[in-house]
Amino acid sequence: MTPEQRALLAERQSTFLESEAVRLPSLIRFIETIGIEPAKHVGTNAAAYLPHLTKVLRDLRCESDQERTVVSARVSEYIGEYFAQRFGGRWFVNDTPDSPTFARYVVGQFSLAPGSTVCIDPFELGMAFARQPGPRDLASLIAKVEGRLEAAIDGGTRAPGSLPH
């Protein structure tokens, strides 16, 4: 690992706990704001919110870069929660220097695939989703990533980075 990579990794790891503390409360507030109630259970049952989020986000307009950034961040948090819960994974900072997701917040270390290095980058997925013109389909995006993740886990793939979307 280069000195630059060490510094970047240390910086990301130092901010990780802070981001962990605000991630779920921010997602809950977003879900409440767009009118889905009760929002508080997303932290334990993210899959139940997928049909509602898909419907609300399908034609949601992002008029400014700031709105797109907010939608991207909240969708990213949702995607991460969904896959962490679905596959028994967790959020962490990727510390594999040759990975395309090095020093990023990712979801992986799935209990359904012990020892696998397969992970997803929810923020990459959320940004791609938010940049799409309407109508957007969150359920289709989740299904596509889920299929690739299941195939990687079932196949025992040892991937150094995130799955493509």
Image (cartoon, grey):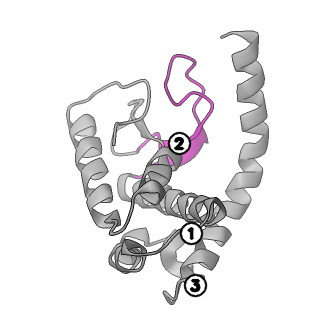
Foreground: 83 or 36?
Answer: 36
Of the numbered discs 2 and 3, the one sitting upstream in the chain is 3
The three-letter code of the residue at mark 3 reads: Glu
Mark nearer the viewer, 2 or 1:
1
Q: Amino acid at mark 1?
A: Glu
Position of 109 with respect to 18 (left or right) is: left
Label 2 sits on residue? 106
Pick the front one: 56 or 77: 56
The answer for how far apart the CA atoms under marks 2 and 3 are is 25 Å
**Relative side of 6 to 54, left or right:** right
- Residues at marks 2 and 3 touching, judged by CB atoms closer than 8 Å: no
Give the residues drawn in magenta, as a range.
88-110
Quadrant the C terminus occupies:
top left
Residue underneath mark 3: 32
Residue position marked by numbered label 1 in the rendering: 63
* Mark before the other along the chain sequence, 2 or 1: 1
- Tell me the quarter of the picture where residue 152 sits: top left
Residue 134 picture location, percent across and down: 36, 68
Question: Mark 2 belongs to which amino acid?
Answer: Val
Quadrant hosting residue 129:
bottom left
Q: Establish if 125 lies above or below 27.
A: above
Query: Rounded to the nearest whole Å, what is the CA distance between mark 3 and mark 1?
Result: 20 Å
Which residue is found at the position 59% from the left and 76% from the top?
A: 30
* Residue found farthest to the front: 63
Residue, x 78% and y 22% (percent of image)? Answer: 7
Q: Quick one: SS at disc 1? A: loop
